[in-house]
Image (spheres, rainbow, N blue to C red):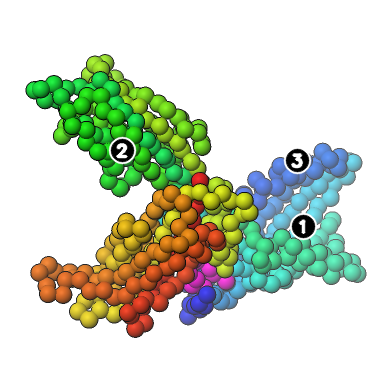
Amino acid sequence: MIEYAPPSIDWLNRFLELMWPFLDKAICRTAQDIAKPIIDENTAKYKIDSVEFESLTLGSLPPTFQGMKVYVTEEQELIMEPSLKWAANPNVTVVVKAYGLKATIQIVDLQVFASPRITLKPLVPTFPCFAKILVSLMEKPHVDFGLKLLGADLMAIPGLYRFVQETIKKQVASMYLWPKTLEVAIMDPSKASKKPVGILLVKVVRAQNLRKKDLLGKSDPYVKLKMSDDKLPSKKTTVKRSNLNPEWNEDFKFVVTDPENQALEINVGKHERMGMNGIPLKELPPDETKVTTINLLKTMDPNDVQNEKSRGQLTLEVTYKPFKEEDMEHEGTEAGDTVEKAPDGTPAGGGLLYVIVHEAQDLEGKHHTNPYAKIIFKGEEKKTKVIKKNRDPRWEDEFEFVCEEPPVNDKLHVEVISKASKKGLIHGKETLGYIDISLADVISNKRLNEKYHLIDSKNGQIQIELQWRTS
């Protein structure tokens, strides 16, 4: 964790000063909304006639930031530690009516000194760009205020002032003192960043009564499969020559990110479409194999009259296998908890190797530095985007590899390459370094996020995050 202290935060205090009249009203309105059901519940419980706010304002003096620390970590998060002081002039007056009596309680002269830690995580490519706010107190806060009842200062009662101070400190510390946190969810992180949540297994079994597509009354069909909202190219079966009732029995696997809205898109074709259809994932019971025979359609428009003409049928076996809850929960761990052990009894079956190429640093190219990363796993190759003229590229590119079994004895090969910006140059590509990562630790720990020194590079490093998810 690297600490960074901004040189000046005067602008932030100035911003808060200008916004305070509006923040005051918004905070007080929210406080009243939160307090109302609590008050209603307790008035009946303790036979109180009513509890009402006669006035509620935090005053004209906003909090001020005395300093700010920002921490840079290897996680997808932003950590800030402001030093906060607030000498307020609030006017909070509560009127309590019970047993025919009326009591007025007033809070005045509020002082708060606190050092909170504010963490925005995980950072996601969807506005507002973070999914949760976590707030902790790094030390017990100092809270001081005046409390008046019927015009008399209650804090002047001997011993009461210190008792109230210590009680507040203990209560706040028990709830929010580091490492305990107050968590505010902004959005669902899995929906915000479209993380994999399961695997779809598909077996293309056979087709029947396909339409003729040549003069000899034959056709050469194949099946194309694709997940909706997926930028990856379609997967294809083999071509069956001169056959209107072909059998394939071929297996495919797809990564699922949104089972409520995604569908398996199916096209049967030769050089032109012979028919199509789709299977919504929300219709599939989890962990159950469903054998289905679907009618092939001309278009996906339910009102198209051309769909009334038969185009044949296609039989498939489909199984949706969601990932285990334990595999999804690691995204909510605190910074520093980079490793979460797999639960006892996790079956030794297949799963998904999830690779996030975050960034590289101190890359050195002899002729050019336009780096991209190439990832190779069991012969399957994937690449990040190219970032031009940058020795410290940040990619944040994500890749998935579906595995039949845990790759405990395998390695992930990552190579950083510089690509010439102009074609035809003698030095078109140049290797900037590589690393082979053993996957045994990833399988046992479920998640690793580390920086690796690149082999054949003087100072180059690359940050790779690896996750293993089982279905």
Can you identify the residue that label 1 sits on? Answer: 106
Check whether the beta carbons of the residues at disc 1 and disc 2 lie within 8 A of each other: no
Q: In 3D space, how far apart are the residues under numbered discs 1 and 2 (Cα atoms)?
A: 68 Å
Looking at the rendered structure, the kind of residue marked 3 is: Asp
333 horizontally vs 426: left or right = right
Q: Earlier in the sequence, mark 2 or mark 3?
A: 3
* 76 falls in the magenta region: yes
Looking at the rendered structure, the kind of residue marked 2 is: Leu
Give SS at disc 3. Answer: helix
- Asked whether the viewer can see residue 446, the reply is yes
- In this figure, what is the number of numbered marks? 3
Can you identify the residue that label 3 sits on? Answer: 40
In this rendering, which labeled residue sits more in front, label 1 or label 3?
3
Can you identify the residue that label 2 sits on? Answer: 225
Give me the residue at 42% from left, 34% from top: 318
Q: Is residue 314 above or below residue 257?
A: above
Please rate how many residues cluster around mark 2, counting C-alpha atoms within 10 Å: few if below 14, some from 14 to 19, many from 20.
many
Q: Position of residue 109 (x, y in %)?
A: 72, 67
* Residue nearest the viewer, comparing 377 with 276: 377
Give me the residue at 38% from left, 43% from top: 253
> Which region is colored magenta?
71-81
